[in-house]
Amino acid sequence: MKRLTTLILILITIFYGALLFAMTPTGGDDITIIHAGTLLAVPGTAPKERQSLVISNGKVIEIIDGFVNAEEYSTESNVTTVDLSQRFVMPGMMDMHVHLTMDNRAARSNFYKTSDADFAMVAVENASLTLMAGVTTVRDLMAMSGEAIMAVRDAINRGVIPGPRIIAAGYALSATAGHSDHFNVREDFAQLYHSSGVCDGAVDCRRAVRDQYKLGAEVIKIMATGGGGDRNGKKDSAAEMFSDELVAIVQAAHRLDLKVTAHAHGTDGINAALEAGVDSVEHSSYMDDTSIKLYRKTGAHLVATAALPKYFQQHPDIPDPVKMGLKVKAVEVNELLHKAHKNGVLFSMGSDAGISNHGDNADELLSYVEIGMTPMEAIETATVNTAALLGMSDKLGSLEPGKIADVIALDRDPLQDISAVKEVSYVMRNGIVFKHR
Ligand SMILES: [Zn+2]
């Protein structure tokens, strides 16, 4: 008898619990209808005027011609209409190369003075700046603290703090004394701060991939050459890693379903990385005809960071060696980027924010127009192309039924003047509004 009473009590609790749950208005049941003056739903296809973008549960439900009112649409659901009838509405931008734990306000990123917790706080601030600039997805391609970037990513995913969706690399993979190893410091310091990304030889480099995966990485970053201002970052510098190391990294990463991207400036490093089967190359400064052929053959994307040289020129306070390297770049590299684009190489947008300013990510698109892209092509590099590079074309990059509702609005038409991408007045990520002015 006692058992039966307990059972009845449990059933009543479940029933009322379910009833209470059904009665509680959940965010998921709400519907948002955005009245878009102009809607560029799928970059690469023509935009349409006066469209209603219907969003629920963080996803696009449908797109209707004309402006549909809440009452017309549904009397059962809680429907909110958003007036963007004077704006240009498009998918959120995606930046494939940022460093959220890094800050060009140098004192905030001094590795030897800053704790993991400090780096997390730096990343929290930068994540917010990024999202408010209309960038709803980023790849973080090397963190000052692997723990910090994963914690910030997870907090954003939980909805605790504002920021873009982060695909994080953790620590970059580099040979000893390579671009992301610590050098020019006391040897005992260098030993102490030895990153799990530093590896020598194929076996050790497989281990380094797995270490980043264990840390929570969703993409792998390789340093195939030195930095732009480094001894090993010149046009004719040899790759910093051997081919067996590059191949081992790509194979180990792909087995874990992780994409691989390689930082490379010199021709040898670019071509070695492409031959090893990387999914994208960062900077790709000194390409030759072989590089362009390899891009075409493998389908790898070029993440140009083309706005960076201009940023350095405008900031005389940047240290000289870095500036010298990039001054040369500005002229010669832009011609090579132009050639790559004309020859059908796929570009994905990447700004290297963290070196340049967080929140100025969209400057990159202005540079793409300068190297010969149409404004539409530039927008494609930050939407449909980036979604393809991430292997997330089914979820991101365009606004179509079933896709994630990452939506931004601009005050002006970027197809007329690309600088309009700098004037973001509305930001929605996963169906949640973060900015509306
Ligand atoms: Zn970078």
Image (cartoon, rainbow, N blue to C red):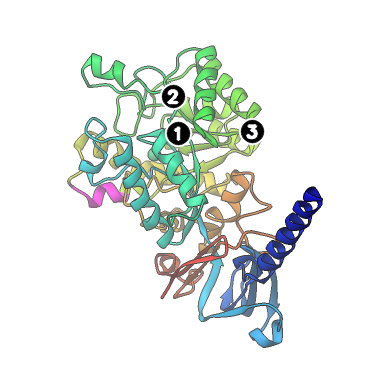
Q: Position of residue 25 (x, y in %)?
A: 62, 71
Residue 170 numbered mark, or none: 1
Q: SS at mark 2?
A: loop
Q: Give the magenta range.
A: 310-316
Q: SS at mark 1?
A: loop
> Is mark 2 in CB contact (under 8 Å) with mark 3?
no
Name which quarter of the figure residue 296 lies in: top right
Q: Quadrant of ligand 1?
A: top left
Q: Where does the C terminus fall, quadrant-wise?
A: bottom left
Q: SS at mark 3?
A: loop
Amino acid type, mark 3: Asp
Amino acid type, mark 1: Gly
Q: Which residue lies furthest to the front in this view?
A: 1
Mark 2 or mark 1: whose residue is earlier in sequence: 1
Whether the residue under disc 2 has CB within 8 Å of ligand 1 = no
Left or right position of 293 against 194: right
State whether residue 209 is above or below residue 164. Answer: above
* Tag 3 residue: 257
Q: Distance from label 2 to label 1 (Cα)? A: 8 Å
Residue 197 numbered mark, or none: 2
State whether residue 406 is above or below residue 102. Answer: below
User: How dense is the environment of label 1, judged by Cα within 10 Å: few (below 14), some, or many (20 and up)?
Assistant: many
**Is residue 343 inside the magenta stretch?**
no
Q: Position of residue 114 (x, y in %)?
A: 25, 36
User: How dense is the environment of label 3, judged by Cα within 10 Å: few (below 14), some, or many (20 and up)?
Assistant: few
> Is mark 1 in CB contact (under 8 Å) with mark 3?
no
Please give the name of the residue rendered at 41% of the width and 33% of the height, measured from the top-left corner.
146
Q: Distance from label 1 to label 3 (Cα)? A: 16 Å
Amino acid type, mark 2: Gly
Q: Distance from label 2 to label 3 (Cα)? A: 18 Å
Mark 1 or mark 3: whose residue is earlier in sequence: 1
Mark 2 or mark 3: whose residue is earlier in sequence: 2
